[in-house]
């Protein structure tokens, strides 16, 4: 697994609303399209969705401030 | 860079915020130290940096970084560390600190302290980044545990193992944020006191206190570290436990980022912190007497 590649993907879905929407609709497909390998895709397929939503909400709130 | 205090004199202070500054200047007899956000001064005009030096001449200052991203698997840019080095040279803080977080990836700035995958790559990345930080700044930072609302994907170990692995590999000391510990323990179902007891007490050099609130998504509640509310009682209990575990002096900082109450309320919280830590110190002394008897 390449952690830098995983970090880059996480940064993208935290910040980019369109990328996040595509990911939530099709986690595996979006991760594969981003060039992630099987281990990285597997890590993202089981992502903590509650945590993702709350993290994004917290981030968006601060940017709006 | 001044050395971290080692005598048994604990210091208590506040995060330096512009909204509080005028009042804080009138209460310096009740504030031992102020914590300044370093990043706010990296590209500040000369006048602002001069005012910071003036502040540091009146009250002990510690510098707190928020955007280095030390715990990424990717190297922190030397330019960012250079800015911290210049500010430390100017201000001569008692110490500087930064979070074990990743804040950018693939060229994207997250604008948020986020938990990296807890695995061997980020332990190695953090260790290398801390070595570079010490080399460029001239002193190693205290590293801070962060609050997270998400279990980071790609992890192969829990937060405690990941944190202690980094402390050992980098020979780093810890700025223990007790509210972050409380929030993560609340959200992910572990005992914060057991977590605290498993930390290397000799590495805990400073403590953060803050408050938060409940937030909800998909029918699930989690505790948000928002720095907008009073310190909750369980965090003071953790501070007492720190006093029982840690033999050396500590710097304790109360963080508040908005919805400011009157300064008297914040000073009252600092007094609660003094009492909580003193209680732990007293218990430690009593335990040592019992053992000696």
Image (tube, coloured by chain):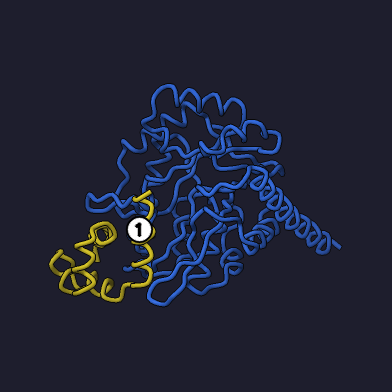
Chain colours: A yellow, B blue
Q: Please name the residue shown 39% across and 29% down the image.
A: B44
Picture mark count = 1
- State the residue lying farthest toward the left: A33
Which residue is nearer to you in this view: A48 or B221?
B221
| Residue lying furthest right | B293
Please provide percent x and percent y for residue B8: 72, 44
Instruction: Place residue B178 in its image quadrant.
Output: bottom right
Residue placed under numbered mark 1 in the picture: B122
Residue B104, percent across and down?
29, 51
Circle 1 Cα neighbour tier, 10 Å, few/some/many (<14 / 14–19 / ≥20) = many
Q: Looking at the picture, how far across and down is residue B152, in whole percent?
A: 36, 66
- What residue is shown at x 36% (from left), y 31% (from top)? B43
Name the side, left or right, on which A4 lies relative to B238. Answer: left
Q: Is residue B58 above or below residue B135?
A: above
Residue B144 in percent (x, y) is at: 49, 52
Mark 1 belongs to which subunit? B
Seen at 45% across and 46% down, the residue is B98
A61 and B16: which is toward the camera: A61
Give SS at disc 1.
helix
B29 versus B233 height, above or below? above
């Amino acid at each position: 697994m390449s952690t830098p590649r995983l970090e880059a993907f996480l940064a993208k879905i935290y910040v980019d609303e369109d990328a996040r929407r595509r990911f939530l609709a099709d986690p595996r497909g979006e991760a594969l399209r981003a060039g992630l390998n099987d281990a990285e895709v597997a890590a993202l397929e089981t992502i903590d969705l509650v945590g993702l939503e709350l993290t994004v909400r917290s981030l968006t709130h601060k940017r709006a401030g | 860079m001044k050395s971290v205090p080692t005598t048994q004199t604990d210091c208590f202070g506040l995060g330096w915020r512009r909204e509080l500054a005028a009042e804080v200047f009138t209460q310096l007899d009740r504030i031992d130290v102020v914590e300044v956000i370093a990043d706010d001064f990296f590209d500040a005009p000369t006048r602002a940096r001069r005012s910071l030096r003036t502040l540091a001449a009146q009250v002990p200052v510690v510098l707190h970084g928020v955007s280095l991203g030390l715990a990424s698997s990717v190297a922190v840019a030397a330019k960012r560390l250079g800015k911290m080095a210049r500010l430390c040279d100017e201000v001569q803080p008692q110490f500087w600190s930064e979070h074990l977080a990743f804040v950018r990836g693939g060229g994207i700035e997250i604008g948020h302290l986020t938990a990296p995958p807890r695995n061997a790559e980020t332990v190695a990345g953090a260790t290398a980044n801390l070595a570079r930080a010490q080399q460029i700044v001239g002193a190693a930072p205290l590293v801070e545990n962060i609050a997270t609302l998400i279990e980071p994907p790609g992890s192969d170990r829990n937060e405690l193992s990941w944190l202690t692995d980094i402390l050992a590999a980098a020979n780093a000391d810890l700025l223990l944020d007790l509210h972050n510990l409380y929030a993560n323990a609340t959200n992910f179902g572990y005992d914060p006191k057991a977590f605290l007891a498993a930390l290397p007490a000799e590495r805990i050099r400073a403590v953060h206190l803050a408050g938060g609130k409940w937030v909800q998504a998909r029918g699930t509640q989690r505790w948000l570290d928002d720095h907008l509310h009073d310190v909750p009682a369980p965090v003071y209990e953790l501070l007492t436990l720190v006093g029982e575990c840690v033999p050396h002096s500590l710097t304790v900082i109360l963080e508040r980022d908005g919805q400011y109450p009157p300064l008297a309320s914040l000073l009252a919280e600092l007094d609660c912190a003094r009492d909580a830590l003193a209680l732990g110190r007293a218990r430690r002394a009593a335990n040592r007497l019992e053992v000696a008897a």
